[in-house]
Image: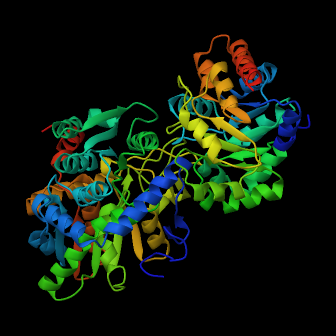
Amino acid sequence: MKNGQTGKVKGKYGKYGGQYVPEVLMPALEELEEGYERYKNDPEFLAELDHYLRDFAGRETPLYFARNLSKKYGSKIYLKREDLVHGGAHKLNNAIGQALLAKYMGKTRLIAETGAGQHGTATAMAGANLGFETVVYMGAKDVKRQQMNAYRMELMGTEVVPVETGSKTLKDAINEAFRDWVTNIENTHYLIGSVVGPHPYPVIVRDFQSVIGREVKKQILQKEGRMPDSIIACAGGGSNAMGIFYPFIEDKDVKLIAVEAGGKALKCTEKAALHSASLCAGEEGILHGARTKILQDKNGQILESESVSAGLDYSGVGPELAYLSDIGRVTARYATDDEALEAFHELSRHEGIIPALESSHALAYLKKASEAGELGEVVVVNLSGRGDKDLETVLSLRGGI
Amino acid sequence: MERQKISEKFSELREKKEGALICYVMAGDPSAEKTGEIVKALVNGGADIIELGFPFSDPVADGPTIQVAGQRSLAAGMDTQRYFELIKTLDVGIPLVCMTYYNPVFRYGVEKFVEKAADAGISGLIVPDIPVEEAADLKNSCEKHGLDLIFLIAPTTTEGRIQKILERGSGFLYLVSRLGVTGAREDVSSSTRELLSRVETGLPKAVGFGISTGEQAAEVRDAGADAVIVGSAFVKIIDEGTDVNERLEALAKELKSGIRRAS
């Protein structure tokens, strides 16, 4: 057993993972798995990927020593600056990787789904650059809430389809993307944006995002001459968390902490959860192609989730993260909307960096755990994205300037 | 009323040299009470087997018609317990099949779900988001309690996978006539013919996805199908809400006569 894979059954992490999809998709998953196995070590593919990551996405991103925050909390706090990736979030690492893979596999059309718009934007950028016809599904509610992001995608030639079914949010957009894929499977690659979905997606997305953790490992050795004591990342589906954690899984002394969206509170009504904390408060089930921890009622109906941060607002979590949390390698924690908002303001004020509301959850936990003295001397926080996209949300919560 | 097994129904029809009409509706849409009348109307119209959907909040293999039906059913209070109670009250002798997604089954407990289904008089199960590779637990429980586990085969299914599915399937095989999700379409795709000829099995072959008229049913039967599955066209009538039972019966009659007219 290495790095969370049992090695016995493909795509399984303990009891999690697998492929729970309609039969019509199985050959597409097999084709994708073959394609990935074929190209993931191909020198030409890797050289091209490296070129895009460096010159288009702007890697490597800095590991920034947050002097003021460090002073305040009495430890050495580093921020991994994924907010500086082109587009403003780590999402492009994966979008470029998968789009390039799709191109090598001869696909001509990309589809994706998006909640806040970060993954949709990343897909639109990759699609425009690599010459794909691109369609992004977005809940009708989210299109309204995130008009600028929808417009950005359209500027780059992507068709944005508002989804009117169900709760009109991310999980409905995912269902719609699956339907499109089922219908257009021959020429279309479904570019999943997080470490969720049926095998091989959780592996592919994790591998493309692992560039974050690999860079951190190198950078922290240069700066501190040793491994960090703790790494903190926010987790909705969990792609930035798996991306920064994965290269450290075998480094048992490094504490890995995934911070989920605690929303208003860690409670549920009959139809909805007031949070998005699947690791902390979800139960085992099957959603969007994988067995993992999900928010559901006693009849197995999926509960709508809630978070001030659209990017964390999802009823499931990546299966590998569920497994790592079960075996105790990853510690799952949560921060509420209010705590995240406080951290959002704090980082802006003290470091001159406006964090995404997603990343603000990781920062909020940093504050709590630092005060409790749980993190050790050297701490890395994954700053998964920048907060420009969230200004309207924050402003409306404050009731204006 | 004692309900027939799926295999008994098909041997009865084989003797009559007749194809089967399999009708799908969502249980509890628009209410549990109405489902009884709906099922009766379909039986009067000539349904040979009825699939009763158990709603799931996130049905990735279904089109909008059936998704909305599921939402209506959930809003009307359908849950696992009520579903089995409803099935027990249905006064029909033909086989009933439960169609749902894996999470409601998994959450309730696979073994318990299958046991209760058998107890309620369900003859078979269709779970479209569970490929053969993940179906071992469900298959074991179904064998233990005498339920057929019905698998789907799609136009994209490779020869190797067809063999795996044939080894594990029972009751009948559900052939998906085209790429896409459930929902009425205007033509019967040529991929139907191709798929029917690719699948060699002793199990009855039922074709579904996109069939809504007697003409299409006749065509599918002519192409070599043992049964025709129709869902969205019925669900649409229930959705429209006017003269529901009469129209369901009339459509079932039209479909059944199309199936009889063929071959």
Position above or below: B262 against A210: above
Front in this rendered view, residue B209 or A270: B209
Using the rendered view, name the quadrant where residue A61 is placed: bottom left
Percent coordinates x, y for residue A8 in the rendering: 55, 76
Q: Is residue B103 visible?
A: yes
Would you say A237 lies left or right of B108 here? left
Residue at far bottom of view? A225
Front position in the image: A346 or B95 = B95
- The image quarter containing residue A179 is top left
Residue A274 in picture, x, y percent from top left: 43, 47
Residue lying at 71% horizontally and 35% vertically, measured from the top left: B51
Above-or-below relation of B180 to A225: above
Pick whichever, B99 or A277, lies toward us: B99
Residue at the extreme right of the image, as rendered: B2
Q: Is residue A309 above or below residue A217?
A: above
Residue A67 sits above or below residue B194 on the image = below
Which residue is pictured at 55% across the width and 42% down the height?
A: A270
Q: Quadrant of the C terminus of chain A?
A: top left
Question: Residue A219: x percent and y percent?
Answer: 15, 79
B163 left or right, relative to B182: right
Specify whether B192 is left or right of B49: left
Which quarter of the picture shows residue A55? Answer: bottom left
Q: Is residue B177 visible in this depiction of the protein? A: no
Query: x and y percent of residue B164 in the render?
Result: 65, 59
Residue at the image point whose x is 54% and y is 59% from the top:
A283
Q: Residue at x 48, y 82 (%)?
A: A1
